[in-house]
Image: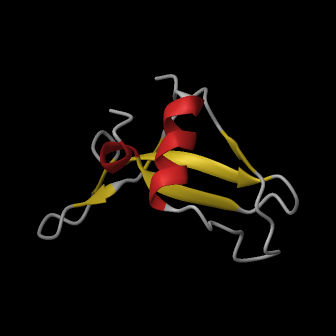
Amino acid sequence: MIVDRYQVQQWLTSHAPTLHCPICSGQSFSVEENSLAVTNCLHEKAGPTDYLSGFPLVVLSCQNCAHIMFFSAKQMGVL
């Protein structure tokens, strides 16, 4: 799935206007638009990891130090 950079930027502007990198305090981020990251789910009783289900995440990368941050794609309205 392709992530709409404009939509992500609009969401960040309205919900996190003072966003800064927790590592270097930079304020310039790139949006990885070619794909979403997805968490893996663990089944509490069975134990094995379910690689087919998880939470989709928008990936932001600090343009200064390359630190990666994840945001819920569903909450951002990307999905």
Point 78% across, 74% down: residue: 25
Residue positioned most to the top: 2
61 with respect to 75 (left or right): right
Question: Closest to the observer: 38 or 61?
Answer: 61
Give how far across and how far down residue 51 sits, in percent.
Answer: 35, 45
Give how far across and how far down residue 77 sits, in percent.
Answer: 33, 39
Point 52% across, 62% down: residue: 16
Taking 19 as reference, is 38 above or below it? above
Point 11% across, 69% down: residue: 45
Residue positioned most to the left: 45
19 with respect to 14 (left or right): right
Question: Closest to the observer: 4 or 42?
Answer: 4
Give how far across and how far down residue 43 sits, in percent.
Answer: 19, 62
Quadrant the C terminus occupies: top left
35 with respect to 46 (left or right): right
Taking 23 as reference, is 17 above or below it? above
Q: Give the color scheme: rainbow, by chain, secondary structure or one colour.
A: secondary structure
7 with respect to 45 (left or right): right
Count of all numbered marks drawn on residues in the image: 0
Question: Closest to the observer: 3 or 45?
Answer: 3
Point 76% across, 76% down: residue: 23
Give how far across and how far down residue 41 sits, in percent.
Answer: 29, 56
